[in-house]
Amino acid sequence: MRHVWGDLRWFEVKFKCIKCGICCIGTEMELTAEDIRRIEAAGYKMEDFVVEKDGVYRLKNVDGHCVFYDPATRMCKIYDIRPIGCRLYPLVFNGSSVEVDKTCPTWHTVPKSEVARLGPYVVEFLKEVERAKVKIKLRL
């Protein structure tokens, strides 16, 4: 399988995350086909972690939080293989440009250089999300 995103760690925003879990509560995180394949390869079934909303595959919520979020430990159960969108957060596309999501309590610790470095990939990520349904259907 060809990896579109290469080394996933490169796409992680460097900032002072306090592991509060706010980004995992009521998530509507979009998924790429590669995200889905990677999580399936770890033994999870697509129907257990994916919902389709507005024609886009997204992480499923259970009890108001991401299916992979453990509220007891405030940790992600699949952190090492988490989706691209989770890695790029708190960078978000506001409809015209990439910005830092001020819902994140430590949004102000994201350096401008990280927005510049990863901003183009946020846009590319959204394009990949749009293609995910076709890719999964065809299993490309």
Image (cartoon, rainbow, N blue to C red):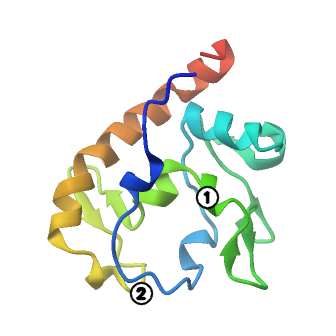
Of pointers 2 and 1, the one earlier in the residue sequence: 1
- What residue is drawn where x is 54% and y is 72%? 23
Location of the N terminus (image quadrant)? top right
Q: How many marks?
A: 2
Secondary structure beneath disc 2? Answer: loop
For the question of whether residue 35 can be seen, the reply is yes
Location of the C terminus (image quadrant)? top right
> Is 102 displayed left or right of 3 in the figure?
left
Picture quadrant where residue 26 is located = bottom right
- What residue is drawn where x is 55% and y is 28%? 132
Residue 33: which disc? Answer: none
Q: Is residue 75 above or below residue 92?
A: below
Of the residues tagged 2 and 1, which is closer to the observer? 1
For the question of whether residue 54 can be seen, the reply is no
Residue kind at label 1, given as amino acid type? Asp
Residue kind at label 2, given as amino acid type? Pro
**Residue under numbered circle 1:** 80
> Please, which residue is most extreme toward the front here?
7
* Disc 2 to disc 1, C-alpha distance: 23 Å
- For the residue carrying disc 2, how many other residues have a C-alpha within 10 Å: few (<14), some (14-19), or many (20+)? some
Q: Is residue 57 above or below residue 108?
A: above
Question: Is the C-beta separation of discs 2 and 1 under 8 Å?
Answer: no
> Please, which residue is most extreme toward the top here?
138
**Residue under numbered circle 2:** 105
Residue 2 coordinates in the image, percent (x, y): 51, 23
Residue 138 coordinates in the image, percent (x, y): 65, 12
> Is 58 displayed left or right of 112 in the figure?
right
Secondary structure beneath disc 1? Answer: helix
